Amino acid sequence: MTSALHGCRPQRPRPSVRKPPSQGHGAVDMTKGDVEECQMMVEEFHTHVATFRELVISIGDASSDSLAGRLQLRRSRGQCSAMATDTCTSMAALNRPEEGEIQYDIYRLYIQFHGCLEMYISEMLKSICLMESFQLQGKGREVRGTPVSGQRGAQDASHAPILDENAASQTPNLADIGWTTPMEIHNTQRDLREMKALLSKLRESMPLPLKNQDDSALLSLIPSYPPLRRRKRKLLRLCCLLAS
């Protein structure tokens, strides 16, 4: 009986010992798949932010600014905001690295997305300033109190950068769609507050090594030169004493 029991005991822990490596390997594969998926989402978000930036620049150009461009800017802003929220949610679901373990792929992904989100927020601020300076009135455009005829805007609407063919071909009335510049500015400010809150949430979910890389931490790494100069002065004094 004792020999049989001793013979069975070594066989019981074997399955429990083999299972953790398989689970760990599966977790690593799952993490790599999640990182690759998040990488694709970040790249797509960066592309949409670049498109949004071109549309924002077109507001300041009288030859390309039109109602069709403003509507395309609104759609692009909605797409970028939705993609930023989805990407932040997907990145929060990534498996956290263990203490002392460095995963450069995840760090690089956080840095890229953080930079893209900051760029998107700055472009939203720029769009608010441009919309306040260049307002659409009726079918025309009012620039700092100077009205511009709507015929020129309709003729040059086809030259607006990165516009859909359907948006460029159709020039709807402001009254027909209920579009007003103050309302558009209000909606942009609302999305801006949401993106700022999302940026704060992203910073909180960052790994610890990235959280410490702020301006104060970088400045603290700069060596202090006055102590070195004092040491040089002391050495010069010692050399003078020895020479005398």
Image (cartoon, rainbow, N blue to C red):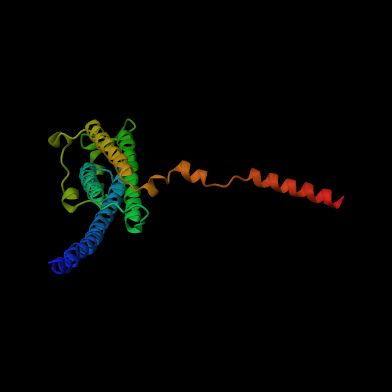
With respect to residue 38, does 60 lie above or below? above
Residue drawn at x 12%, y 36% is 176
Q: Nearer the viewer, residue 33 or 198?
A: 33
Q: Give residue 28's quadrant in the image.
A: bottom left
Query: Can see residue 61?
Result: no
Q: Nearer the viewer, residue 114 or 12?
A: 12
Asked if residue 199 lies left or right of residue 232, the reply is left
| Residue 165 in the image, given as x and y percentages of width and height | 18, 53
Q: Quadrant of the N terminus?
A: bottom left
Q: Nearer the viewer, residue 197 or 210?
A: 210
Residue drawn at x 22%, y 63% is 17
| Residue 92 in the image, given as x and y percentages of width and height | 25, 48
| Residue 55 in the image, given as x and y percentages of width and height | 28, 47
Query: Can see residue 93?
Result: yes
Q: Nearer the viewer, residue 114 or 206?
A: 206
With respect to residue 69, does 24 lie above or below? below
With respect to residue 196, does 243 lie above or below? below
Q: Give residue 57's quadrant in the image.
A: top left
| Residue 63 in the image, given as x and y percentages of width and height | 30, 46
Residue drawn at x 24%, y 43% is 66
Q: Give residue 139's quadrant in the image.
A: top left
- Give the number of marks: 0
Residue drawn at x 29%, y 49% is 49
